[in-house]
Amino acid sequence: MRRRMGVALVAQAADGAFEVAERVARDASDRGVPLRLLGGQAVRLLCPSFPARARQGQDMDFASVSSAKGAVMEFLAGHGFLGDRRFNTIHGDRQMYFTTPDGQTSVDVIMDRLRMCHVLEFKARIDRMPYTLDVTDLLLTKLQVVEQNEKDVQDIVYLLAAFEVREGDVPGTIGLGRIGDVVGSDWGWWRTVTRNLDRVIELARGDLRRLVPGESPHDPVEQGRRLREHADATPKTLKWKIRAKVGEHAQWYELPEETGH
Protein backbone atom coordinates (compact mmCIF):
# COMPACT_ATOMS: atom_id res chain seq x y z
CA MET A 1 0.00 0.00 0.00
CA ARG A 2 2.82 2.42 0.86
CA ARG A 3 4.52 1.76 -2.46
CA ARG A 4 1.29 2.37 -4.36
CA MET A 5 0.81 5.67 -2.55
CA GLY A 6 4.37 6.69 -3.44
CA VAL A 7 3.88 5.91 -7.11
CA ALA A 8 0.60 7.83 -7.06
CA LEU A 9 2.31 10.88 -5.58
CA VAL A 10 5.03 10.80 -8.20
CA ALA A 11 2.46 10.42 -10.97
CA GLN A 12 0.70 13.55 -9.71
CA ALA A 13 3.88 15.64 -9.52
CA ALA A 14 3.66 16.98 -13.05
CA ASP A 15 0.08 18.10 -12.41
CA GLY A 16 0.74 19.88 -9.13
CA ALA A 17 4.22 20.04 -7.62
CA PHE A 18 2.98 22.07 -4.68
CA GLU A 19 0.25 19.57 -3.81
CA VAL A 20 2.75 16.72 -3.94
CA ALA A 21 5.33 18.65 -1.90
CA GLU A 22 2.69 19.40 0.72
CA ARG A 23 1.65 15.74 0.95
CA VAL A 24 5.28 14.65 1.22
CA ALA A 25 5.93 17.16 4.01
CA ARG A 26 2.81 16.13 5.92
CA ASP A 27 3.51 12.42 5.55
CA ALA A 28 7.13 12.91 6.64
CA SER A 29 5.94 14.73 9.75
CA ASP A 30 3.43 11.98 10.52
CA ARG A 31 6.19 9.37 10.23
CA GLY A 32 8.70 11.33 12.30
CA VAL A 33 11.05 11.99 9.37
CA PRO A 34 12.64 15.47 9.66
CA LEU A 35 11.86 16.78 6.17
CA ARG A 36 10.65 20.38 6.02
CA LEU A 37 9.64 22.46 3.02
CA LEU A 38 11.83 25.37 1.92
CA GLY A 39 11.39 28.20 -0.57
CA GLY A 40 8.27 29.45 -2.26
CA GLN A 41 6.31 26.25 -1.63
CA ALA A 42 6.91 26.62 2.11
CA VAL A 43 5.69 30.22 1.96
CA ARG A 44 2.60 29.12 0.04
CA LEU A 45 1.83 26.45 2.63
CA LEU A 46 2.21 28.96 5.47
CA CYS A 47 0.15 31.66 3.73
CA PRO A 48 -2.82 29.75 2.26
CA SER A 49 -5.14 32.78 2.13
CA PHE A 50 -2.76 34.84 -0.03
CA PRO A 51 -2.77 34.54 -3.84
CA ALA A 52 -0.29 31.89 -4.95
CA ARG A 53 2.44 33.34 -7.11
CA ALA A 54 2.99 31.86 -10.53
CA ARG A 55 5.62 29.16 -10.39
CA GLN A 56 7.53 27.71 -13.30
CA GLY A 57 9.19 24.33 -13.06
CA GLN A 58 8.42 21.39 -10.84
CA ASP A 59 11.27 21.47 -8.33
CA MET A 60 10.77 20.81 -4.63
CA ASP A 61 13.13 22.03 -1.92
CA PHE A 62 13.35 20.56 1.57
CA ALA A 63 15.48 21.00 4.68
CA SER A 64 16.64 18.08 6.79
CA VAL A 65 19.49 16.98 9.05
CA SER A 66 22.46 14.79 8.20
CA SER A 67 21.75 12.44 11.10
CA ALA A 68 18.51 11.46 9.32
CA LYS A 69 20.10 10.92 5.90
CA GLY A 70 19.19 7.23 5.77
CA ALA A 71 15.63 7.80 6.94
CA VAL A 72 15.11 10.56 4.37
CA MET A 73 16.47 8.40 1.54
CA GLU A 74 14.21 5.50 2.51
CA PHE A 75 11.20 7.78 2.90
CA LEU A 76 11.59 9.47 -0.50
CA ALA A 77 12.29 6.14 -2.21
CA GLY A 78 9.07 4.86 -0.68
CA HIS A 79 7.27 7.76 -2.35
CA GLY A 80 8.66 6.85 -5.75
CA PHE A 81 11.53 9.33 -5.99
CA LEU A 82 14.84 8.17 -7.43
CA GLY A 83 18.03 9.26 -5.69
CA ASP A 84 21.13 10.34 -7.58
CA ARG A 85 23.39 7.70 -6.05
CA ARG A 86 26.71 9.25 -7.02
CA PHE A 87 25.74 12.79 -6.02
CA ASN A 88 24.19 11.68 -2.73
CA THR A 89 27.24 9.59 -1.85
CA ILE A 90 29.63 12.49 -2.44
CA HIS A 91 27.51 15.40 -1.18
CA GLY A 92 24.94 13.69 1.04
CA ASP A 93 26.18 15.28 4.25
CA ARG A 94 25.35 18.69 2.74
CA GLN A 95 22.72 18.07 0.08
CA MET A 96 20.82 15.22 -1.57
CA TYR A 97 19.13 15.10 -4.94
CA PHE A 98 16.16 13.05 -6.17
CA THR A 99 13.92 13.00 -9.24
CA THR A 100 10.75 11.37 -10.43
CA PRO A 101 11.28 8.44 -12.83
CA ASP A 102 10.41 10.67 -15.80
CA GLY A 103 12.94 13.29 -14.68
CA GLN A 104 10.34 16.06 -14.78
CA THR A 105 10.34 16.80 -11.04
CA SER A 106 13.45 17.19 -8.93
CA VAL A 107 13.81 17.24 -5.16
CA ASP A 108 16.71 18.97 -3.40
CA VAL A 109 17.24 18.20 0.29
CA ILE A 110 19.52 20.64 2.12
CA MET A 111 21.17 19.18 5.21
CA ASP A 112 21.90 21.00 8.50
CA ARG A 113 22.61 24.43 7.03
CA LEU A 114 21.84 26.54 3.99
CA ARG A 115 24.95 27.73 2.17
CA MET A 116 24.12 30.49 -0.27
CA CYS A 117 25.13 34.13 -0.02
CA HIS A 118 25.50 33.46 3.71
CA VAL A 119 25.39 30.36 5.89
CA LEU A 120 22.22 29.73 7.87
CA GLU A 121 22.43 27.00 10.50
CA PHE A 122 19.12 25.23 11.09
CA LYS A 123 20.10 21.77 12.34
CA ALA A 124 19.00 22.42 15.92
CA ARG A 125 15.78 24.09 14.73
CA ILE A 126 14.43 21.52 12.26
CA ASP A 127 11.57 20.43 14.55
CA ARG A 128 10.20 23.88 15.39
CA MET A 129 7.48 23.66 12.71
CA PRO A 130 5.76 20.47 11.51
CA TYR A 131 5.86 20.91 7.72
CA THR A 132 8.18 23.81 6.92
CA LEU A 133 11.38 25.32 8.18
CA ASP A 134 10.81 27.72 11.07
CA VAL A 135 9.11 30.97 9.97
CA THR A 136 12.02 33.18 11.04
CA ASP A 137 14.56 30.90 9.40
CA LEU A 138 12.48 30.79 6.23
CA LEU A 139 12.43 34.59 6.19
CA LEU A 140 16.20 34.66 6.68
CA THR A 141 16.68 32.33 3.69
CA LYS A 142 15.04 35.06 1.61
CA LEU A 143 16.71 38.04 3.28
CA GLN A 144 20.19 36.57 2.72
CA VAL A 145 19.85 36.65 -1.09
CA VAL A 146 22.10 39.38 -2.49
CA GLU A 147 20.69 39.36 -6.02
CA GLN A 148 16.98 39.24 -5.27
CA ASN A 149 14.24 38.83 -7.84
CA GLU A 150 10.54 39.62 -7.61
CA LYS A 151 9.74 36.14 -6.28
CA ASP A 152 12.09 36.68 -3.34
CA VAL A 153 10.49 40.04 -2.60
CA GLN A 154 7.00 38.56 -2.76
CA ASP A 155 7.91 35.74 -0.38
CA ILE A 156 9.36 38.25 2.10
CA VAL A 157 6.26 40.46 1.84
CA TYR A 158 3.98 37.47 2.39
CA LEU A 159 5.82 36.30 5.50
CA LEU A 160 5.87 39.82 6.93
CA ALA A 161 2.15 40.16 6.21
CA ALA A 162 1.19 36.79 7.70
CA PHE A 163 3.30 36.44 10.86
CA GLU A 164 3.81 38.77 13.79
CA VAL A 165 7.22 40.28 14.46
CA ARG A 166 7.69 39.92 18.20
CA GLU A 167 10.27 39.64 20.94
CA GLY A 168 11.86 36.29 21.65
CA ASP A 169 11.94 33.28 19.37
CA VAL A 170 8.52 31.62 19.48
CA PRO A 171 7.72 29.13 16.68
CA GLY A 172 5.12 30.53 14.31
CA THR A 173 6.32 34.11 14.73
CA ILE A 174 9.10 36.24 13.28
CA GLY A 175 11.33 36.20 16.33
CA LEU A 176 13.47 39.24 17.02
CA GLY A 177 15.66 37.06 19.21
CA ARG A 178 16.61 34.81 16.31
CA ILE A 179 17.07 37.74 13.92
CA GLY A 180 19.29 39.49 16.45
CA ASP A 181 21.43 36.40 17.03
CA VAL A 182 22.12 36.09 13.30
CA VAL A 183 22.74 39.72 12.35
CA GLY A 184 24.41 40.68 15.62
CA SER A 185 27.20 38.14 15.27
CA ASP A 186 28.03 38.54 11.57
CA TRP A 187 28.48 41.93 9.91
CA GLY A 188 27.97 40.42 6.46
CA TRP A 189 24.60 38.99 7.44
CA TRP A 190 23.65 42.36 8.93
CA ARG A 191 24.66 44.27 5.79
CA THR A 192 22.69 42.01 3.44
CA VAL A 193 19.60 41.77 5.65
CA THR A 194 19.38 45.51 6.29
CA ARG A 195 19.98 46.33 2.64
CA ASN A 196 17.24 43.93 1.58
CA LEU A 197 14.80 45.18 4.20
CA ASP A 198 15.33 48.75 2.99
CA ARG A 199 14.70 47.61 -0.56
CA VAL A 200 11.62 45.52 0.24
CA ILE A 201 10.06 48.33 2.28
CA GLU A 202 10.61 50.76 -0.59
CA LEU A 203 9.24 48.36 -3.21
CA ALA A 204 6.22 47.38 -1.09
CA ARG A 205 5.31 51.05 -0.79
CA GLY A 206 5.91 51.80 -4.45
CA ASP A 207 6.69 49.82 -7.59
CA LEU A 208 5.69 46.43 -6.18
CA ARG A 209 2.81 47.48 -3.97
CA ARG A 210 0.67 45.00 -5.91
CA LEU A 211 2.53 42.20 -4.10
CA VAL A 212 1.06 43.23 -0.74
CA PRO A 213 -2.00 41.05 0.04
CA GLY A 214 -5.21 43.05 0.23
CA GLU A 215 -6.34 41.59 3.53
CA SER A 216 -3.57 40.43 5.83
CA PRO A 217 -3.09 40.19 9.59
CA HIS A 218 -0.09 42.53 9.58
CA ASP A 219 1.28 45.49 7.65
CA PRO A 220 4.44 44.16 5.96
CA VAL A 221 5.94 47.63 5.66
CA GLU A 222 5.60 48.37 9.37
CA GLN A 223 6.85 44.91 10.27
CA GLY A 224 9.81 45.35 7.94
CA ARG A 225 10.62 48.66 9.60
CA ARG A 226 10.56 47.02 13.00
CA LEU A 227 12.97 44.34 11.82
CA ARG A 228 15.22 46.99 10.32
CA GLU A 229 15.32 48.97 13.55
CA HIS A 230 16.03 45.84 15.56
CA ALA A 231 18.90 44.86 13.28
CA ASP A 232 20.60 48.15 14.10
CA ALA A 233 19.73 48.13 17.80
CA THR A 234 20.67 44.53 18.61
CA PRO A 235 23.99 44.12 20.49
CA LYS A 236 26.94 43.32 18.25
CA THR A 237 29.82 40.92 18.91
CA LEU A 238 33.48 41.91 18.84
CA LYS A 239 33.85 39.95 15.59
CA TRP A 240 31.02 42.02 14.08
CA LYS A 241 32.63 45.29 15.14
CA ILE A 242 36.02 44.34 13.74
CA ARG A 243 34.50 43.35 10.39
CA ALA A 244 32.40 46.53 10.33
CA LYS A 245 35.60 48.60 10.18
CA VAL A 246 36.36 47.02 6.80
CA GLY A 247 32.81 47.61 5.62
CA GLU A 248 32.02 47.19 1.95
CA HIS A 249 35.66 47.52 0.89
CA ALA A 250 35.77 43.70 1.02
CA GLN A 251 33.04 41.42 -0.30
CA TRP A 252 30.86 40.15 2.54
CA TYR A 253 28.85 37.48 0.71
CA GLU A 254 29.17 34.55 -1.66
CA LEU A 255 27.39 34.18 -4.97
CA PRO A 256 26.40 30.51 -4.96
CA GLU A 257 26.91 28.33 -7.99
CA GLU A 258 24.62 25.48 -8.95
CA THR A 259 26.01 22.10 -7.93
CA GLY A 260 25.94 19.75 -10.89
CA HIS A 261 23.80 16.63 -10.46
Image (tube, rainbow, N blue to C red):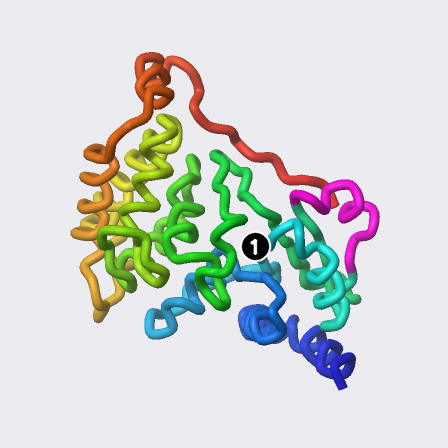
Q: Position of residue 59 (x, y in %)?
A: 61, 59
Residue at 35%, 26% (x, y): give it. 187
Residue 201 versus residue 158 in the image, above or below = above
Q: Position of residue 129 (x, y in %)?
A: 45, 64
Residue 7 lies in what quarter of the image?
bottom right
Q: Is residue 125 magenta?
A: no
Location of residue 82 (image quadrant):
bottom right
Task: Indicate the quadrant containing the N terminus: top left, top right, bottom left or bottom right.
Answer: bottom right
In magenta segment, residue 88: yes
Q: On the picture, is 11 further left or further right than 157? A: right
- Between residue 28 and residue 127, name the one nearer to us: 127
Residue most toward the bottom? 1
From the top left corner, tell me how far across and down residue 31 is, in percent.
62, 73
The stretch in magenta equals: 83-94
Q: Depth check: give the residue in front, 81 or 150.
A: 81
| Residue at screen point 31% across, 59% down | 173
| Within-10-Å neighbours for mark 1: few <14, some 14–19, many 20+ | many
Question: Residue shown at 37%/21% (left/top)?
Answer: 239
* Residue denoted by label 1: 63
111 versus 161 height, above or below = above
**Which residue corresponds to the image point at 56% horizontal and 35% vertical from the top-left?**
256
